[in-house]
Amino acid sequence: SEDDLRSLFSPFGTVLEVNVPRKPDGKMRGFAFVQLKNVLEAAKALRGMNMREIKGRPVAVDWAVAKDKYRATQGGQPEGEEQSGGDGEKEEEEEEEEEEEEEKE
């Protein structure tokens, strides 16, 4: 959940925002965005959390890319077909494994 992610990332710095995108049916899409106060804190979180096991599964953490920049790298991929996107450079993406586990709770 958003609160779980906030707790996991807060030891690395000030968590400004946590966003867990959901499908139209309300289920989690399998990734999340965690925005920290600055790039230094985000870098610490990335190093500390990437491939860490959460609920028994390794979780990938990486820099998020703004949606418009991501689309530009995909050669104008049609709307709705992008893999993921972000709102800013200071965000990190925590992928699929944790959210899939949380859906089962």
Image: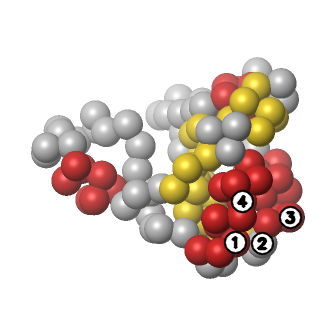
Instruction: Confirm or deny contact between disc 4 and disc 1 (CB under 8 A).
Output: yes
Instruction: Confirm or deny contact between disc 2 and disc 1 (CB under 8 A).
Output: yes
- Pointer 2: what residue? 13
Label whose residue precedes the other's in the sequence (3 or 1): 3
- Pointer 1: what residue? 41
Mark 1 neighbour density, 10 Å: few (under 14) some (14–19) many (20 or more):
some
Look at label 2 and name its amino acid.
Gly
Which residue is at 75% across, 44% downward? 1
Q: Is residue 33 or residue 21 the one in the foreground?
A: 33
Label whose residue precedes the other's in the sequence (2 or 1): 2
Residue 74, image x and y in percent? 21, 43
Look at label 3 and name its amino acid.
Pro
Label whose residue precedes the other's in the sequence (3 or 4): 3
Q: Is residue 99 or residue 54 the one in the foreground?
A: 54
Mark 4 neighbour density, 10 Å: few (under 14) some (14–19) many (20 or more):
many
How far separated are the C-alphas under marks 3 and 1? 9 Å
- Pointer 4: what residue? 45
| Residue 105, visible in the rendered structure | no
Instruction: Confirm or deny contact between disc 3 and disc 4 (CB under 8 A).
Output: no
Q: Is residue 101 left or right of residue 24?
A: right
How far separated are the C-alphas under marks 2 and 1? 5 Å
Residue 82, image x and y in percent? 31, 39
How far separated are the C-alphas under marks 4 and 1? 6 Å
